[in-house]
Amino acid sequence: MFGLFKAKPVLSAEDTEFQVATYQWLLRNFGGKDFYDDAKLILPTKEYFPSRVSCEDEAAAETFNIVKKFAGMEEWPCRLEKQEEDVDYRVAPALGVQGAPHTPLGTFQANENNEVVITYNPGIVGNPTQLVAMFAHELAHYLTGGCKEAPPGGWDNWEFATDIAATFLGFGLFMTNSAFIFQQFTEVGAQGWQSNKNGYLSEAEHVFALAIFLQLKGIPVETALRFIKPALKKLLKDAVRQVESTKIIEELQAVQYLPQANDESEVAS
């Protein structure tokens, strides 16, 4: 009878298993001192993003460099390029075009010479949270692309594992807060609503990945609650409680770091 009031799990058993398996993969190939001693929860504050910039191009470049630094990839060679502007889907006041093409928020490319290019959509520069999340995701591609061990479920799951890898690098708040953006816009002669999805995981999956990161690093949940979207505060608390009620952290802490499983001289495209 009392089981009727038991809290509903944040994720299904299958999704939880994937998260744990992905963290095991990350810890095995990219863990060790770099994770336990150096990785930190990156916060949307001036302490982490102190720069003042004069234009959008400068803002994108400066943000990219900061994300690289906190990802521990400051010295990794990479070229940043701006994509073409999106097509304006509004052809007249209060009139839009369905199916108008949109460029992706960001891309990761690596050629046969291991030259790496990350591109960004200039339309998201005005949204720092989304910009940081996108850069973290693409840099997570760069980090994991040369791994000889496939992510859980194979390389078809790479995008999902990459979202978790971005949280593993410390950018879980940005990944979670930008997972789904729904906002109203008002312009001369037009108004409406628009939504945007960043990354491949759901909000609940991002929250759970963040909860695992907090527990692994011994970071109080209150630190994240100060900055997470209000609508997700309870979900994060539930996720932390769910992780605490299992042996997930104990299992992850037992993972042995095997750096030889990763060859930085190879980058998958």
Image: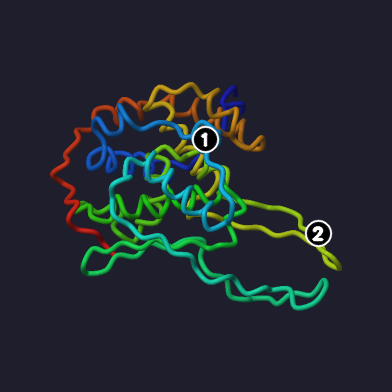
Position of residue 20 measured from the top left corner of the image (x, y, whole percent): 35, 39
Q: Is residue 63 above or below residue 254?
A: below
Q: In front here: 113 or 14?
A: 113
Q: Residue furthest right?
A: 189
Q: Secondary structure at mark 2?
A: strand
Residue at (47% x, 42% y) in the render? 12
Q: In front here: 6 or 105?
A: 105
Circle 1 sits on which residue?
9
Residue at (28% x, 27% y) in the render? 253
Quadrant assignment, res 52? top right
Circle 2 sits on which residue?
186
Direction from residue 5 to residue 263 in the image, left or right: left
Direction from residue 196 to residue 47 in the image, left or right: left
Disc 2 marks a residue whose amino acid type is: Thr
Residue at (30% x, 26% y) in the render? 37
Tell me which label, 2 or 1, sits earlier in the chain: 1
Direction from residue 227 to residue 119 in the image, left or right: left
Position of residue 88 measured from the top left corner of the image (x, y, whole percent): 67, 73
Position of residue 116 measured from the top left corner of the image (x, y, whole percent): 31, 61
Q: In front here: 201 or 113?
A: 113
Q: Which image quarter is the N terminus in?
A: top right
The alpha-carbon separation of the residues under discs 2 and 1 comes to 39 Å
